[in-house]
Image (cartoon, grey):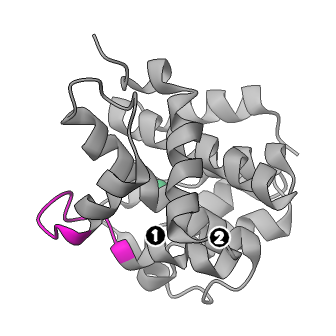
Amino acid sequence: MISREEALQLLHAKNNEHNLICHALESEAVMRGLAEKLGQDEELWGISGLLHDLDYATTKEDHDRHGLDTVDMLEGKLPEEALNAIRRHACEMNGAEEPSTQMDFALRCGETVTGLIHAAALVRPTKIDGMKPKSLKKKMKDKAFAASVNRDCIRECDKLGIELTEFLQIAIASITAIAPNVGLTAE
Ligand SMILES: [Fe+2]
């Protein structure tokens, strides 16, 4: 399997947009948190989170290739279960099979919740510090807030047997641990 260091180099080679790098690091952090909770392989889940949107820059205009081009770039570098999760995280765009494994659902809800948490943190004076699941639940109900974040995808955490409040707590804690790297600490 590709090492984290190689994965990071690859990520920077394919993406130079700050927002995307932050999204990748946050997705990695949440995937590690979920793997720990579920007794899964933290390194594998983390690296898969880090790389899941590797093709973002090149498939922005070509959504039906999103996920598939990433898998083409990662063939042989990650095991098939991870490649499947990457294909399936964007199955609505690329026509891949629907998610079915724990890892599939973890990547979908894990990468999606980062958008909600990042946006919510940016409008708080203390950024992510002190954020609570309850306030995120309120934001989920406010359809105008971070409107592009798919709430149904976040709710797929129940397929992992993790209730929404606990899932949000795991995601907040995971991203809080890397907050300085993704610009979410109070100035
Ligand atoms: Fe993503």
User: Magenta residues, as a range?
Assistant: 141-151
Say what secondary structure mark 2 lies in: loop
Apparent side of residue 96 relative to residue 5 in the rendered image (left or right): left
Vertical position of residue 77 compared to residue 11: above or below: below
Q: Residue at x 63, y 74 (%)?
A: 105
Mark number, residue 154: 1
Apparent side of residue 97 relative to residue 44 in the rendered image (left or right): left
Tell me if mark 2 has few (under 14), some (14-19) or many (20+) residues whose alpha carbon lies within 10 angstroms of its own.
Answer: some
Q: Nearer the viewer, mark 1 or mark 2?
A: 2
From the viewer's side, name the closer residue of 53 and 175. 175
Amino acid type indicated by mark 2: Ile
Say what secondary structure mark 1 lies in: helix
Q: Residue at x 80, y 61 (%)?
A: 38
For label 1, being within 8 Å of ligand 1 is answered no
Tell me if mark 1 has few (under 14), some (14-19) or many (20+) residues whose alpha carbon lies within 10 angstroms of its own.
Answer: many
For label 2, the residue is 162
Q: CA distance from mark 1 to mark 2?
A: 11 Å
Q: Is residue 144 magenta?
A: yes
Q: Residue at x 18, y 36 (%)?
A: 123
The location of residue 177, given as percent across then percent down, is 58, 27
From the viewer's side, name the closer residue of 131 and 41. 131
